[in-house]
Image (tube, rainbow, N blue to C red):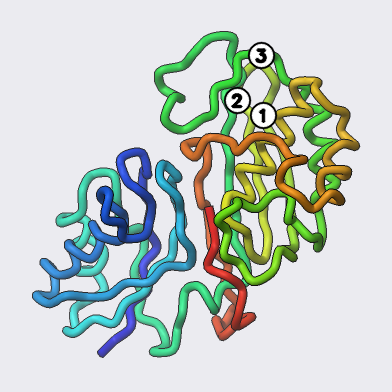
Amino acid sequence: MPRIKLVLEYDGTHYVGWQLQPNGPSIQGRLMRALQQLVGAPVDVFAAGRTDSGVHAQGQVVAFDSPVNLPLRAYWMGLNGLLPDDVAVVRAEEVAPAFDPRRWAKGKRYLYRLSNLRGRSPLRRLTHWEIFQPLDLEAMKLGATHLLGRHDFSSFRAAECEAKHPIRELTRVQFEGSAGDEIRFTVEGTAFLRHMVRNLIGTLVNVGRGKHPARWVQEVLEAKTREHAGVTAPPHGLTLMEVFYADPPGPHAPAESPQDE
């Protein structure tokens, strides 16, 4: 039974998230349905991490054991003919039978998009958090520097987060773009808590709006309580861009939580 790894791209607008839910369609459910049509039998699929309702992905990694031997082209082009227009397979490959997209991951990269135009943008409404008030991008960049490194991110975890501990390491925090137009926030880390990226953004936007100085981000981090941080940014601005693996891939830390955005 070959184990197949897929890289998925999807628009999360009309889904309750990656994981199967009783209250609406999920990415996982759509993929399992398409796989059953392709191979003629039910197939379980597991992912590198959950994405919440409305969150998008350009590089979600999933794996499954196929009950039949098909050319890799079938898991790419064949599945794409069965999936809805807002979900697509980008790459397919056969991997080691022990490959686990979550436990073998070394890290992830997320992108959060802000639209800082003076008025609303119909073309950005499903992919950007629209903030019409002018933002101080330089202050946001300075505030973000306090987040680099290994910290207790309790102030930025969701109340319902089930992770065993709040210690995470961020290896990259970077703002690009320009105030008054599009602002892009890229963050990379070894693992993430639930809503962590969106809570980071909500806090940095408070700095950009002039509600707090850049050094306040450090104070929020040291407080270790969610009440000190900013609001949770809307999900539709967030995209899972890439999941990182060792080359060659191999087991990573065995117990980082699957909690994600």
**Nearer to us in this view, 43 or 152:** 152
**Nearer to us in this view, 141 or 168:** 168
Mark in the foreground, 2 or 3: 3
Q: CA distance from mark 1 to mark 3?
A: 16 Å
Residue 138 position in % (x across, y down): 82, 28
Residue beneath label 3, please? 133
Quarter of the figure with residue 83: bottom left
**Nearer to us in this view, 16 or 170:** 16
Q: Secondary structure at mark 1?
A: strand
Q: CA distance from mark 2 to mark 3?
A: 13 Å
Query: Looking at this rendering, what residue extends furthest in the top direction?
Result: 118
Looking at the picture, which amino acid does disc 1 mark? Gly
Residue beneath label 1, please? 177
Looking at the picture, which amino acid does disc 3 mark? Gln
Residue 190 position in % (x across, y down): 67, 66
**Nearer to us in this view, 82 or 20:** 20
In the displayed structure, would residue 215 be above or below residue 149?
above
Q: Earlier in the sequence, mark 1 or mark 2?
A: 1
In the displayed structure, would residue 114 be above or below residue 179?
below
Packing grade of label 3 (10 A; few <14, some 14-19, many >=20) is: some
Q: Residue at x 60, y 20 (%)?
A: 131
Disc assigned to residue 80: none
Residue beneath label 2, please? 182
Looking at the picture, which amino acid does disc 2 mark? Glu
Q: Are marks 1 and 2 in contact (CB under 8 Å)?
A: yes
Quarter of the figure with residue 5: bottom left
Residue 129 position in % (x across, y down): 54, 28
